């Protein structure tokens, strides 16, 4: 018998059905997938011998009626073991390990399925070797669990006439698998809690020439079933400010694709502790390698943002708004504080024209770009999806020549194949002209940040913008301590932190023009360290930051990409503590939900001895006034854990020399 820990395959025969089962295990031997080739093709997963996924079938139905995965005829099985290190620019570490065992099952008819077993998950994908283009009618994806486990489900807030038209922003509904709303679809990632610390996070990676995967209630009461948007048939310009293409009819298929290709990975991240869950890199590892050869021009960083704070600059002698005087104030603020970029969000181009070559008369863009350039600040422009798509080559060339550094493209609000194709085309075209992208109104990253390093950030998160209009029924503090274990698994998040007006649970209220955050000041500071965000927007106004110089200076000095990341402690939905290193400096931060906590932070990884540090912690009255904080210079002795108290909705942030 071959050694399973080395990923060798065992084959057993079933006399009743002539079924064949292949076992593939993770490098550490704890995770095992059993792949069963019978009248159908299915697989199951176990962790240390405990079943975490019951047999779950997989299939692909072609437009001509052929079904891969039904009555499959196995031709051969090949296997490999990989143990290497990947450079990871603009990521949470400068390099990461890529260790897995793989088995590829080739079937007669020109198709295969590849399985990979990592220490923290099992993934599979279909592979096609067809010579002619394919129409895909349906993909069968199922996750059948052994019990009626608790799921954390982000339902899509779709249009009544099209559930797939959504911005991929929502809280997580905590429901039993048997109680999932059968009238709704859920976008990914999605988490299932099997108890005793074992959690399974479902996501996908390497999404190309295919629609994004949703989950719906399965036929099995303890299961989930895959769902996709069908390919658009007819569309009409409309949506937000006429900047979207609204699908009116869809075809009777989900994809039209090349015949020879690999399909997206279906990923089950399996861990028995939440630190490992928040530490996973599987979405990045499973993505296609970079298609941009020269990335030397790509410059991550922070950006002064105008929209969230409603251009509210005070103490000036001009009327603030979408005009050159206001943006020069933002540029001055960025230059004075070492902030790399200023963004012109929606409003600089003529409204409802979907034409990025029509600029409002209050803006002289050439003057702003020249002014910013002399101060070492880059200009980024907001663009509605359809306006960018309809004139992409011309827009990218023109604004790149003008000196613009990147685009924030917004309101895609779909992930059918046509929109996925747009994202790949936009990334390629932008890179051609040395432009980076920040994608809002966008589905999960799904590894795109590896394939296109010029996509620096992605929304697809229920971020701080919600505070402009959401009442207190939105528990943003609970959401903040859930997404490091769910959404962030899929890649970086443009959450847009940094609010200087902070509120307790009782004092919070929505204010569109002078918004505040839920939770404490130190919670907001900590988000710059806890969240992966290579292109981070400072949400508040320069006036509010200048009134809070200690917080401003701390935020301005935080890097946005890292040489090393460690999740030190945490519990999904309760709290998290993250440490990140840039060069020889460490940044450590933690956040909690509305529950106050006394944490013991183990900093022994710093090595023995005493270390100088700057600490921002919640003030003693932060439970009454969320802006209350203390800044302290301290000596850290790593021989014992550091005690730190977090207020309700609180946090802490630590810089260690």
Image (cartoon, helix red, strand yellow):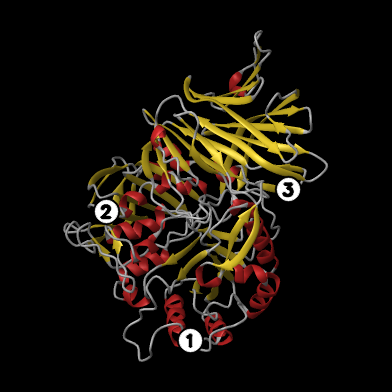
Is residue 31 visible in the rendered image? The answer is no
Q: Which residue is mark 3?
A: 257
Q: Position of residue 157 (x, y in %)?
A: 45, 54
**Quadrant of res 623:** bottom left
Q: Which residue is mark 1?
A: 324
Q: Earlier in the sequence, mark 3 or mark 1?
A: 3
Q: Is residue 503 left or right of residue 572?
A: left
**Marking on residue 649:** 2
**Marking on residue 525:** none
Q: Is residue 652 left or right of residue 230?
A: left
Tell me if label 2 and label 1 are in contact, CB under 8 Å.
no
Residue at left 22%, top 48%? Answer: 596
Residue at left 41%, top 67%? Answer: 538
Q: Residue furthest right?
A: 131
3D distance between C-alphas at marks 2 and 3? 47 Å
Secondary element at tag 2: loop
Secondary element at tag 3: strand
How many C-alpha atoms fall within 10 Å of the one at disc 3: few (<14), some, or many (≥20)? some
Q: Nearer the viewer, mark 3 or mark 1?
A: 3
Q: Position of residue 413 (x, y in %)?
A: 53, 59
How many C-alpha atoms fall within 10 Å of the one at disc 1: few (<14), some, or many (≥20)? some
């Amino acid at each position: 018998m071959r050694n399973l820990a080395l990923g060798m395959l065992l084959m057993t025969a079933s006399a009743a059905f002539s079924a064949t089962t292949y076992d593939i295990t993770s490098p550490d031997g704890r995770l095992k997938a059993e792949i069963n080739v019978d009248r159908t093709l299915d697989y199951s997963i176990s962790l240390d011998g405990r079943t975490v996924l019951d047999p779950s079938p997989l299939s692909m139905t072609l437009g001509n009626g052929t079904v891969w995965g039904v009555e499959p005829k196995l031709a051969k099985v090949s296997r490999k073991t990989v143990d290497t290190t990947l450079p990871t620019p603009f990521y949470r570490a400068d390099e990461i390990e890529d260790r897995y065992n793989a088995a590829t099952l080739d079937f007669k008819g020109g198709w295969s399925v590849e399985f990979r077993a990592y220490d923290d998950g099992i993934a599979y994908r279909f592979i096609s070797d067809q010579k002619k283009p394919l129409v895909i009618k349906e993909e069968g994806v199922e996750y059948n669990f052994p019990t009626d486990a608790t799921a954390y489900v982000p339902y899509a807030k779709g249009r009544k006439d099209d559930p797939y038209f959504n911005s991929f922003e929502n809280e997580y509904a905590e429901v039993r698998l048997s109680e999932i709303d059968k009238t709704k679809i859920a976008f990914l990632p999605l988490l299932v809690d099997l108890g005793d610390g074992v959690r399974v996070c479902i996501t996908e990676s390497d999404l190309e020439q295919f629609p994004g995967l949703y989950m719906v209630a399965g036929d099995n009461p303890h299961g989930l079933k895959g769902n996709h948007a069908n390919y658009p048939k007819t569309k009409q310009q409309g949506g937000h400010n006429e900047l979207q293409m609204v699908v009116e009819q869809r075809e009777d298929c989900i994809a039209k694709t090349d015949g020879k290709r690999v399909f997206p990975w279906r990923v089950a991240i399996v861990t028995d502790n939440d630190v490992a869950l928040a530490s996973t890199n599987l979405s990045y590892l499973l993505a296609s390698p970079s298609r941009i050869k020269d990335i030397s021009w790509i410059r991550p960083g922070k950006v002064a943002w105008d929209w969230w704070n409603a251009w509210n600059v005070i103490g000036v002698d001009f009327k603030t708004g979408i005009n050159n005087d206001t943006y020069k104030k933002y540029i001055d603020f960025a230059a004075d504080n070492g902030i790399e970029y200023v963004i012109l969000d929606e409003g600089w181009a003529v409204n409802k024209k979907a034409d990025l070559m029509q600029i409002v008369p209050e803006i002289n863009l050439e003057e702003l770009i020249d002014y910013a350039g002399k101060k070492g600040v880059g200009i980024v422009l907001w663009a509605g999806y359809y306006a960018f798509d309809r004139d992409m080559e011309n827009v990218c060339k023109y604004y790149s020549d003008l000196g613009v550094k990147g685009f924030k493209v917004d309101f895609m609000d779909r992930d059918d194949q046509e929109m996925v194709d747009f994202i790949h085309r936009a990334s390629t075209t932008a890179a051609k002209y040395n432009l980076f992208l920040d994608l809002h109104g966008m589905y999960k990253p799904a590894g795109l940040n590896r394939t296109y390093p010029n996509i620096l950030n992605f929304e697809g998160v229920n971020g701080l913008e919600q505070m402009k209009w959401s009442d207190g029924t939105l528990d943003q503090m609970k959401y903040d301590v859930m997404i490091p274990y769910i959404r962030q698994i899929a890649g970086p998040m443009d959450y847009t932190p940094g609010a200087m007006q902070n509120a307790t649970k009782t004092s919070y209220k929505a204010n569109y023009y002078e918004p505040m955050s839920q939770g404490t000041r130190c919670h907001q500071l900590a988000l710059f360290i806890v969240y992966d965000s290579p292109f981070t927007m400072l949400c508040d106004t320069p006036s509010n930051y200048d009134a809070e110089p200690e917080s401003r200076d701390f935020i301005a000095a935080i890097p946005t990409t890292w040489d090393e990341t460690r999740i030190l402690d945490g519990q999904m939905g309760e709290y998290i503590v993250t440490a990140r290193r840039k060069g020889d400096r460490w940044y450590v931060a933690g956040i909690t939900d509305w529950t106050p906590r006394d944490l013991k932070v183990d900093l022994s990884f710093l090595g023995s001895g005493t270390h100088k540090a700057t600490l921002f912690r919640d003030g003693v009255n932060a439970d009454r006034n969320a802006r209350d904080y203390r800044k302290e210079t301290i000596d850290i002795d790593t021989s014992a854990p550091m005690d730190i108290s977090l207020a309700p909705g609180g946090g802490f942030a630590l810089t260690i020399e």
